[in-house]
Image: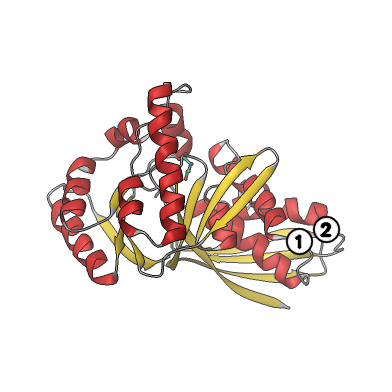
Amino acid sequence: EEIKVFCPATIANVSCGFDVLGLALDSVGDEMIVRKTSAKGIRITKILGQDLPLETEKNVSGVAGLALLHESNFDGGFEIEIDKRIKPGSGIGSSAASSAGAVWAMNELLGRPFSHLQLVKFAMQGEKLASDVAHADNVAPAIYGGFTLVRSYDPLDIIPIPTPSELVATVIHPQIEIKTSDSRKILKTTISLEKGIKQWGNVGGLIAGLFQNDYDLIGRSLQDHIVEPIRSILIPGFDEIKANALASGALGCGISGSGPSIFALSKGMETAQSVAESMKETYSKFGIPFDIHISKI
Ligand code: HSE
């Protein structure tokens, strides 16, 4: 018995929501085949597209899958084949796609014994392996779809948020690798009250905008006063890409997860395409290869 699943790429943080907000892309992601076996444990049999470890304990899908198996009364195991299209270190949730895809597929094959929240907990073990921190802002949207808010980590509380129908993401991925663990190390561990006030005002505004289909409010709220000023230094051309994306009509633009990908959200496909054009034009002069994705959420 086997199942083939789509494992979506995700944009974590979404500007103002460091470690708590995330969204899943509709049409960018990996594919994974998971097979039930009578042999116990998890075997990763094939990874296409990227050079990643096949050893179960060193692979995020293996580790997430083991966390699920450990809580399950299933006596057998699973084999995993991954068609890895999202590059590791790209900032669009490569590890989350593999972790979430594996546990999603296993849960389906077992007749859905686990809730979405439990699947997020298992997938977070994969994130811990990848980035040293079991953050849930990529795996939660990968499991629930759409936008999600991690209201609390302890206890884990995930809130699915509705997505206005015309919201489209444009993502540019400069082909440089930034490890999440490295781009977390450069962050400060304290913030000023002044910045906090701005930031939580925007988180509330973004959530309200998503519920009310208020694109202007979404745009006003897509700001990050805490993480972006520090991390953007690692991304060549960030300021220019952002300024030009906003001039092309994007509602907002920021770093996708821990970078180097940069995302913009737009109202409607046409604007998202103009934003993609502006990103292409802006980045062409930086001499770094890149690719661009446009996707509904
Ligand atoms: N919230 C995490 C970070 C996401 O920004 O470090 C990593 O994809």
Which one is in front in this view, the residue at disc 1 or the one at disc 2?
1
Tell me the residue that label 1 is attached to.
114
Q: How is the image coloured?
A: secondary structure
Ligand 1 within 8 Å, label 1 CB: no
Please determine whether, in this image, residue 221 is positioned above or below residue 23. above
Quadrant of the drawing holding the C terminus: bottom left
* Dot 1 and dot 2 residues touching (CB under 8 Å): yes
Count neighbours of disc 1 (C-alpha within 10 A) and say few if under 14, some if 14 to 19, many if 20 or more.
Answer: some
The amino acid type of the residue labelled 1 equals: Phe
Q: Name the spot of residue 242 as percent of width and height, x first.
A: 22, 47
The amino acid type of the residue labelled 2 equals: Ser
Kindly identify the residue that appears in the image at 41 percent across and 46 percent down: 205
Q: Name the spot of residue 207 as percent of width and height, x first.
A: 46, 51
Tell me the residue that label 2 is attached to.
72
Q: Secondary structure at mark 2?
A: loop
Q: In which quadrant of the rendered view does residue 295 lie? A: bottom left
Q: In which quadrant of the rendered view does residue 118 lie? A: bottom right
Residue 221 is left or right of residue 48, and the answer is left
Q: Is residue 128 among the parts visible in the rendering?
A: yes
